[in-house]
Image: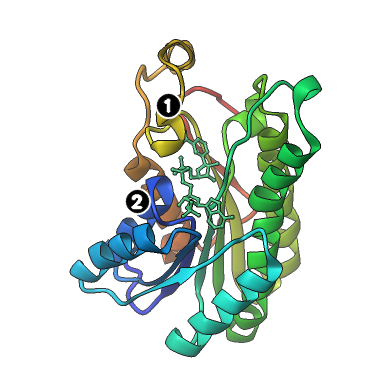
Amino acid sequence: MDLSGRIALITGASQGIGRACALALAEAGADLVIGSRNLEKLRQVAAEVEALGRKTLALSLDVSSSDSVQRAVTAALEALGRIDILVNNAAITKDSLVMRMKPQDWDEVLRTNLDGAYHCIRAVLPGMVRQRYGRIINISSVVAQAGNSGQANYIASKAGLIGLTKAVAAEVASRNITVNAVAPGFIATPMTDQLPEGVRQKILSLVPLGRMGTDREVAYGVRFLASDEAAYITGHVLNINGGMYMA
Ligand SMILES: NC(=O)c1ccc[n+]([C@@H]2O[C@H](COP(=O)([O-])OP(=O)(O)OC[C@H]3O[C@@H](n4cnc5c(N)ncnc54)[C@H](OP(=O)(O)O)[C@@H]3O)[C@@H](O)[C@H]2O)c1
């Protein structure tokens, strides 16, 4: 897969799946704009990408703020000229049973995970429409399809991303822009490192392949959807879940 000459914006690239996407896209030849709130960690990822010989712009970015997103996209366009690929990866969890869920935790998760993707799509689309080329990949989750207790806010945001994917895919297909979602299953990252051992074992018992996925295995799916080989795929949800949910 060759992404030479392409420029990708990846949100939440300071660790986990976002970092793995940064490295996988850079290995295929893309130059990158990476963003997250923690600039120090992000700079370490930028150094790893630069070691692969690719240009990287690391930007402080809070996807839940439309102003922050607009500032980052403006800076990216000034520095690199255009954005060909957007990976909406940044997300948080604030888990609790819905009866105990604080409105603030509901809002914060929806604002980051769903509004954040909307802000980023809205900021990059004018350029993609003008250049008649774009690849947008939204990172959803297996729980958006299968459900799970204690994650109503997170699941609502991730199911919303699937709807957003299909709506925007229909709107921009005529401009040669594809919009797809990736739905990872149980992946070893700092997000899942926080889970108690009992919960991990229970989730693992639901995975036919019998192990957690790696961030790289998700990144390879993202890289495929970003490539020319995936030109005729749009509005699709790619499951990378070890068989945990078979749609
Ligand atoms: N791990 C799994 O098993 C799994 C399963 C299904 C789906 N996913 C999805 O895969 C994606 C990555 O997950 P992960 O496990 O790699 O998560 P993670 O390790 O917690 O990383 C999340 C990233 O998002 C960034 N972020 C959080 N809030 C942000 C904000 N407001 N603005 C900008 N960046 C923000 C974080 O950086 P800062 O803190 O520096 O901002 C971090 O880089 C997420 O969309 C997640 O929902 C993960």
Residue 113 image label: none
| Residue 201 appears in the figure | yes
In-front residue for pair 142/104? 104
Viewed as shown, does residue 57 lie left or right of 99? left
Which residue is found at the position 49% from the left and 68% from the top? 60
Which residue is found at the position 59% from the left and 43% from the top? 140
Whether tag 2 and tag 1 are in contact, CB under 8 A, the answer is: no
Q: Element type at marker 1?
A: loop
Viewed as shown, does residue 88 lie left or right of 47? right
Looking at the picture, which amino acid does disc 1 mark?
Gly
The quadrant in which the C terminus is found is: top right
Residue 126, given in percent of the width and then of the height, sits at 67, 80
Residue 41, given in percent of the width and then of the height, sits at 35, 57
The quadrant in which the N terminus is found is: bottom left
The crowd level at tag 1 (other Cα within 10 Å; few <14, some 14-19, many 20+) is some
Viewed as shown, does residue 15 lie left or right of 147? left
The crowd level at tag 2 (other Cα within 10 Å; few <14, some 14-19, many 20+) is many
Q: Is residue 111 above or below residue 39?
A: above
Viewed as shown, does residue 136 lie left or right of 22? right
Sequence-wise, the earlier of marks 2 and 1 is 2
Indicate the quadrant where residue 178 lies: bottom right
How far separated are the C-alphas under marks 2 and 1? Answer: 18 Å
| Residue 162 appears in the figure | no
Q: Which residue is mark 1?
A: 242
On whether ligand 1 comes within 8 Å of the CB at mark 2, the answer is yes
In-front residue for pair 189/238? 189
Residue 51, given in percent of the width and then of the height, sits at 19, 68
Which residue is found at the position 57% from the left and 47% from the top? 91
Q: Which residue is mark 2?
A: 20
Q: Is residue 103 above or below residue 64?
A: above
Q: Element type at marker 2?
A: helix
Looking at the picture, which amino acid does disc 2 mark?
Ala
